[in-house]
Amino acid sequence: MQATAFTYDSDTRAGSVLLDDGTPLPFDAAAFDAGGLRLLRPGQRVRIEVEGEGEARRVTFVTLQTL
């Protein structure tokens, strides 16, 4: 699934993405680390993996979107 980086805190390695429908979805340090990234800037297109439904939905993987 694709999204856009919305927020990112380099101290905690956590932040949030915006899904293409505008829904914000937070991610934690574990999801950030799983993608092997070192830095993320708001506005970057990312590829994410999510699990769960509704309020329990969470991001498990964040990496840069490549073609």
Image (cartoon, grey):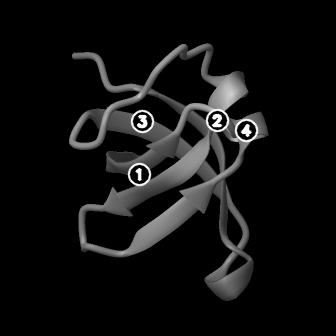
Which residue is disc 1 drawn over?
7
Tag 2 and tag 3, C-beta contact below 8 Å: no
10 Å crowding of disc 3: few (<14), some (14-19), many (20+): some
Residue at the spot of label 2: 13
Q: Residue furthest bottom?
A: 55
Query: Where does residue 57 sit, x and y in percent of width and height?
Result: 67, 71
Residue denoted by label 4: 29
Give the image location of residue 65, x and y in percent.
32, 26
Q: Earlier in the sequence, mark 4 or mark 2?
A: 2
Determine the secondary structure under disc 3.
Answer: strand
Q: Residue 28, percent across and down?
A: 70, 48
C-alpha separation, residue under disc 2 versus residue under disc 1: 10 Å
Label 4 to label 1: alpha-carbon separation? 13 Å
Task: Report, in whole angstroms, how far the alpha carbon at label 4 lies from the one at label 3.
Answer: 16 Å
**In the depicted structure, whether residue 29 falls above or below residue 57:** above
Q: Are marks 4 and 2 in contact (CB under 8 Å)?
A: yes
Q: Which residue is mark 3?
A: 47
Q: Nearer the viewer, residue 48 or 18?
A: 18
> Vertical placement of 53 versus 27: above or below?
below
For the residue carrying disc 1, how many other residues have a C-alpha within 10 Å: few (<14), some (14-19), or many (20+)? some
Per the image, label 1 sits on a secondary structure element best described as: strand
N-terminal-most mark, 2 or 1: 1
Q: First in sequence, mark 4 or 1: give its number.
A: 1
